[in-house]
Amino acid sequence: MTDCIFCRIASGEIPCRKVYEDEEILAFHDINPVAPVHFMLVPKLHLASLAEAEETHAALLGKMLLLAPRLAGEQGLANGFRTVINTGRGGGQEVFHLHIHVIGGGNIPPMVRRN
Ligand code: 5GP
Ligand code: ZN
C-alpha cells in the first residue's frame, strides 16, 4: 500500500515523531494535534478501518488497546486521556489506515455536544 500515508510512515519512508514501535505496531504524534498530547497507534499491517477488521486481527487490536494507557502514561497523561477511532467517511475518518487517537493534556470537551 505505497499510496497509504500511514503505511509509508510505518515503513520509515515518511518521517514521524515516534512514541513507540514494535514489530506489529507504531505510535507517533499527530501532525496536527487537537490537544497538548495527541498521538496515534497504528498497526503496521494495512487495515483500512475498524470496519475491515476480522477475527484474525483480534489479538492485534487487543494489543493496541492495552498499549494505549501505557503510552498515555509515558506521555504524561496521568489523569486520563481520550481514545478515538474514526471509522469510515460517516465517522469522520480521513486517513484510511486504522488508527487509534490518544488525546489529552488539555481541556477535553464533552465528546458529544447537544445544542
Ligand atoms: P482521522 O480523521 O482519519 O481519524 O485522522 C487522521 C489524522 O492523521 C489527523 O488527525 C491528521 O492530523 C493526521 N495526519 C495526517 N497526515 C499525517 C502525517 O503525514 N503525519 C502525521 N504524524 N499525522 C498525520
Ligand atoms: Zn496503510
Image (cartoon, rainbow, N blue to C red):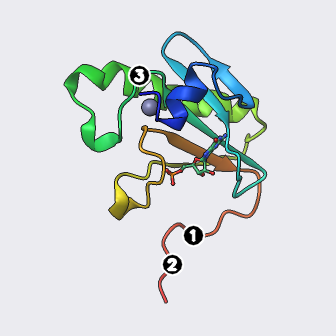
The residue carrying mark 2 has its beta carbon less than 8 Å from ligand 1: no
Q: Nearer the viewer, residue 76 or 18?
A: 18
In the rendered image, which quarter is residue 46 located in? top left
x then y, percent, for residue 49: 35, 41
Q: Nearer the viewer, residue 49 or 62?
A: 49
Q: Earlier in the sequence, mark 3 or mark 1?
A: 3
Residue on which disc 3 sits = 45
* Residue 32 vertical position relative to residue 13 in the rendered view, above or below: below
In the rendered image, which quarter is residue 67 located in? top right
Q: Is residue 38 left or right of 2 when viewed as pictured?
A: right
From mark 3 to mark 2, how far is it between C-alphas? 34 Å
Residue on which disc 1 sits = 110
x then y, percent, for residue 63: 45, 22
From mark 2 to mark 1, how far is it between C-alphas? 6 Å
Q: Mark 3 or mark 1, which is nearer to you?
A: 3
Residue on which disc 2 sits = 113
Q: Tag 2's secondary structure?
A: loop
Q: Tag 3's secondary structure?
A: loop
x then y, percent, for residue 18: 71, 26
- Amino acid type, residue under disc 2 in the picture: Arg
